[in-house]
Image: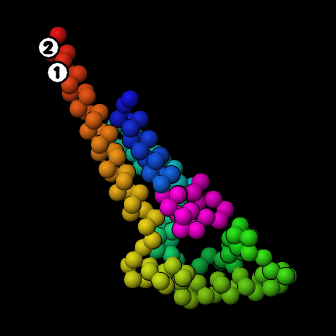
Amino acid sequence: MTTDRIIWEELEQLRRDIIEASRKAGQEASGDTYAAIAVEAVSISGGQLTGPGYIGVLARGRRPGKVPYNFAAIIKEWAAYKGISFGSEEEFDRWANAVAWKIRRDGTSLWQDAGSMGLEQDIFYTPIRDFTTRISKRLAGFYETQIVKQIDNLWQ
């Protein structure tokens, strides 16, 4: 076992824990956001978990304001993944445009309920706390073992 391996394993577990927390919160649609979360740049000095720039909305929701030009289409795609359907395409378009307008004006319900007050869903906090605890114990154990081996080698 190496420190690189410990860091990679723990970052990978952190990735899985964040995804699981988001799924438990009912946030999964296509899985594209989860697929974009990746462990990268692992070395003896550390590593990183990367994800899409919008990942914070999982915890805080989406604030009101400017939205992508195709936001209604994005909402329709999300609705299709969630199994939301309508009697006609016209109804579906009307609904998606209304939702896009509402989010643009007020933000998502998660933002309205918590994000605007600085509160967040626990998508990241507990997984990061658990990650910190696990990696600290594992690295301390690794280095303790290495030191004991070095000392034993001195006495032989």
Residue behind mark 2: 155
- What mark, if any, has residue 5 been given in the picture? none
Q: Quadrant of the N terminus?
A: top left
Q: Nearer the viewer, residue 67 or 24?
A: 24
Amino acid at circle 1: Ile
Task: Indicate whether 146 appears above or below 20.
Answer: above
Query: Disc 2 marks which amino acid?
Result: Trp
* Colouring of the image: rainbow
Assess whether mark 2 and mark 1 are in contact (beta carbons under 8 angstroms): yes
What is the magenta range?
18-35
Q: Position of residue 127 (x, y in %)?
A: 41, 57
> From this viewpoint, is residue 77 visible?
no
* Helix, strand or loop: magenta stretch: helix
- Tell whether 88 sits left or right of 52: right
Name the image quarter holding residue 69: bottom right
Q: At x 53% / y 54%, what residue is drawn?
A: 37
